[in-house]
Image (tube, rainbow, N blue to C red):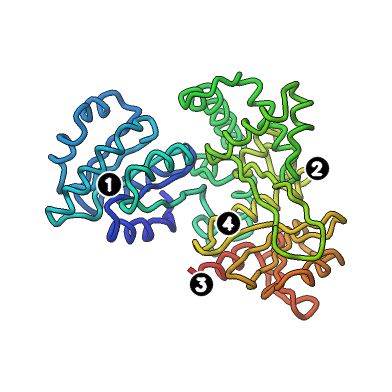
């Protein structure tokens, strides 16, 4: 089992909140992590997809009062939206009795639904945390760091995919993961979208990894309206399968791109959708550079402190920075991403940096060393970049 870096944060959150919610896609490791936390204290695990566990909660308030001395882990709680009002009453009664914190650990895989349901009922009583796939810091061993990093990039961060015996088995697991989402998980949430249509849309997003979102172009290819494409994207973002990276919209004297960039969040899923099975195939595929870009961006965004805000910067004439992190007003980090082991910066990056109040400039590349270029720019490995962000938390 992998040691997840989110674990101490969850334990800390339970120390001063009645409830902590862990949001993440299916198979990201939420249940494994929650059960690991549950071993450290009296706990009860209830799966809302299990009819027997749902039966126990026919009278939620009455049943949960009998478990007042345990951490109650509620898995797939978006399947039981009416539960949140009962949790509010149980939490408030517990506070009056002197036991307010560390009562519930809530797991969910549909962010908007869960946030909406819980924020109305549990305002001031719940803390939200996100669990993505495995990060480089969680999987890399000192003796073969680059090999582990490339395996994570190829297979993605779902623990079962990364830990498979070989690339072929990992690929097969991801194909089954995709099929399960399309045929079971998404219909359970309500949308009646043909699995074949959504599969084509998901694959199109993989082909256009990291590009500006063009609903009209995708709609024409699928034979549906652009508004329908936007709804498909909203669904995939809500399921935590796709990330929408917003453009920088600050006050500069240039015409800025206003369209978001879209990334399939897990590169293993990208490669499965494109039928890329091993690293040699990845090296020769047109998605190679954008796949690395998405891998780096997702890794960095999952490591950012809560106060930091990510964007990309692009002007109408093509001047751009792959990732801009706003650490504070007028305090920005510029990060360029290169899949090459010998990265070179174009003039457009430096021009873009002149437009903004950039405090730090980095190039995250596919190698493992760190060295300066152009005096004010540092080339770093992805693990080194994550280490720098960890010191900010």
Residue 138 as seen in the image, left or right of residue 178: left
User: Residue 107's spot in the image, x, y percent?
Assistant: 38, 42
- Residue at the spot of label 4: 301
* Numbered badge on residue 391: 3
Q: Is disc 2 surrounded by few (<14), some (14 to 19) or many (20+) residues within 10 Å?
A: few
Q: Residue furthest bottom?
A: 375
Front position in the image: 382 or 303: 303
Q: CA distance from mark 1 to mark 3?
A: 29 Å
Please report whichever mark, 2 or 1, sits nearer to the chain's N-terminal start: 1
**Of marks 2 and 1, the one in the foreground:** 1
Query: Are the residues at dot 3 and dot 2 in contact (C-beta closer than 8 Å)?
Result: no
Q: CA distance from mark 4 to mark 2?
A: 24 Å
Q: Looking at the image, is 46 positioned above or below residue 248?
A: above
Looking at the rendering, which quadrant does residue 363 occupy? Answer: bottom right
Residue 158 at x, y percent in the picture: 52, 43
Callout 4–callout 2 Cβ contact below 8 Å: no
Badge 1 marks a residue whose secondary structure is strand
Q: Which residue is mark 1?
A: 104
How many numbered marks have been drawn onto this rendered protein structure? 4
Q: Are marks 2 and 1 in contact (CB under 8 Å)?
A: no
Q: CA distance from mark 4 to mark 3?
A: 15 Å
Residue 367: image quadrant is bottom right
Inter-mark Cα distance, 3 to 2: 35 Å
If you read the primary sequence from the N terminus, does the residue marked by circle 3 or circle 2 appear first? 2
Of mark 1 and mark 4, the one earlier in the sequence is 1
Residue assigned mark 2: 286
The foreground one among 109 and 164 is 109
């Amino acid at each position: 089992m992998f040691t997840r870096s989110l674990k101490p944060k969850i334990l800390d959150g339970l120390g001063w909140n009645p409830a902590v919610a862990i949001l993440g896609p299916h198979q990201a490791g939420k249940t494994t992590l929650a059960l690991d936390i549950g071993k450290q204290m009296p706990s009860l695990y209830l799966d809302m997809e299990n009819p027997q566990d749902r039966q126990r909660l026919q009278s939620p308030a009455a049943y949960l009062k009998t478990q007042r001395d345990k951490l109650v882990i509620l898995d797939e709680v978006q399947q039981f939206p009416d539960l949140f009002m009962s949790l509010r009453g149980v939490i408030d009664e517990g506070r009056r009795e002197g036991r307010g914190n560390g009562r519930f650990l809530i797991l969910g895989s549909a962010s908007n639904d869960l946030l909406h349901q819980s924020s109305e009922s549990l305002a001031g009583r719940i803390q939200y945390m996100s669990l993505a796939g495995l990060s480089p810091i969680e999987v890399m061993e000192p003796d073969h760091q680059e090999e582990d990093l490339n395996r994570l990039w190829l297979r993605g961060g779902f623990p079962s995919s990364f830990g498979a015996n070989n690339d072929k088995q990992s690929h097969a697991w991801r194909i089954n993961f995709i099929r399960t989402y399309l045929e079971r998980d998404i219909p359970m949430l309500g949308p009646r979208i043909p699995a074949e249509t959504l599969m084509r849309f998901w694959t199109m997003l993989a082909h256009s990894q990291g590009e500006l979102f063009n609903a009209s172009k995708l709609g024409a290819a699928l034979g549906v309206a652009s508004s329908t494409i936007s709804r498909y994207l909203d669904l995939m973002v809500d399921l935590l399968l796709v990330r929408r990276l917003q453009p920088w919209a600050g006050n500069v004297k240039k015409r800025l791109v206003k369209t978001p960039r879209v990334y399939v969040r897990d590169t293993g899923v990208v490669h499965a959708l494109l039928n890329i099975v091993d690293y040699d195939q990845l090296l020769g595929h047109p998605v190679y550079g954008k796949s690395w870009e998405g891998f780096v961006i997702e890794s960095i965004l999952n490591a950012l402190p809560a106060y930091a805000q990510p964007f990309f910067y692009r002007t109408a004439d093509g001047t751009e920075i792959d990732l801009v992190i706003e650490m504070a007003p007028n305090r920005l980090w510029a990060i360029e991403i290169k899949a090459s082991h010998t990265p070179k910066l174009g003039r457009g990056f430096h021009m873009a940096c002149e437009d903004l109040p950039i405090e730090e400039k980095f190039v995250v590349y596919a190698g493992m060393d760190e060295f300066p270029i152009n005096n004010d720019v540092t080339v770093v490995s992805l693990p080194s970049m994550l280490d720098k962000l960890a010191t900010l938390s």
